[in-house]
Amino acid sequence: MGIPAIAFSQVERGWGNIDDAAQWAMAFVQSMTRRSMTENSPWLLNVNIPNKPFNELKAPKICRLGRRHPAERVITQVNPRGETMYWIGGAGLAKDEAHDTDFFATAEGHVAITPLQVDLTDHQGLASWQDCVTHLEKVE
């Protein structure tokens, strides 16, 4: 929508050092605002903060996203009121945690910053998909 955005996350569950993560996030946004970085063209950042005290957080690193194995399955149950509820399975284990990923940076104690793009289009595959669709039977 043309608005700069940041998604902040802590690396581990449990709210450990959440106040420190919030302090870091606030200082980061304030620094960007002072430098007029929030007024530029739209951008999207994914920021992962290790669950550490503020003074133990290492300098931020610009990284690519690591990859995970598939997440655990969703468990569907019915509660005592007869309503369906869903327990979302945990994230999968790290599959790609190379030295240039957010997984590696946060494991080393750094705040990991990954610039993202929203366009998920497979631009390289457009032509081959067009060729496939051209040869399909007419769908009605």
Image (tube, rainbow, N blue to C red):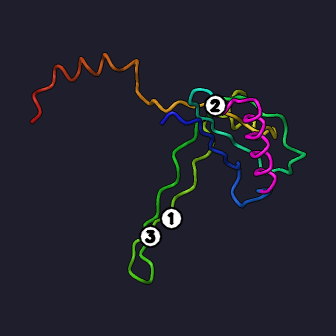
Query: How crowded is the residue under tag 1: few (<14 C-alpha within 10 Å), some, or many (20+)?
Result: few
The span shown in magenta is: 19-39
Image quadrant holding the C terminus, namely top left
Q: Quadrant of residue 84?
A: bottom left
Which residue is disc 1 drawn over? 87
Looking at the image, residue 128 lies above or below residue 137 = above
- Residue 19 position within the rendered picture, expressed as x and y whole percent measured from the top left: 79, 56
| Rendering coords of residue 77 (x, y %) | 43, 72
Circles 3 and 1: CB atoms closer than 8 Å: yes
Q: Earlier in the sequence, mark 2 or mark 1?
A: 2
Residue drawn at the location 64% of the way across and 31% of the way down: 39
Q: Amino acid at mark 2?
A: Glu
The disc labelled 3 sits on which kind of residue?
Met
Q: Earlier in the sequence, mark 2 or mark 3?
A: 2
Residue visible at 67% across and 48% down in the picture: 9
Choose mark 2 or mark 3, whichever is in front. Answer: 2
Instruction: Name, please, the residue furthest toward the bottom.
Output: 80
Magenta span: chief secondary structure: helix
**Residues at discs 2 and 3 in contact (Cβ within 8 Å):** no
Label 2 sits on a secondary structure element that is helix
**Marks 2 and 1: which is nearer the front?**
2
Query: How many C-alpha atoms fall within 10 Å of the one at disc 2: few (<14), some, or many (≥20)?
Result: few
Q: Which residue is mark 3?
A: 85
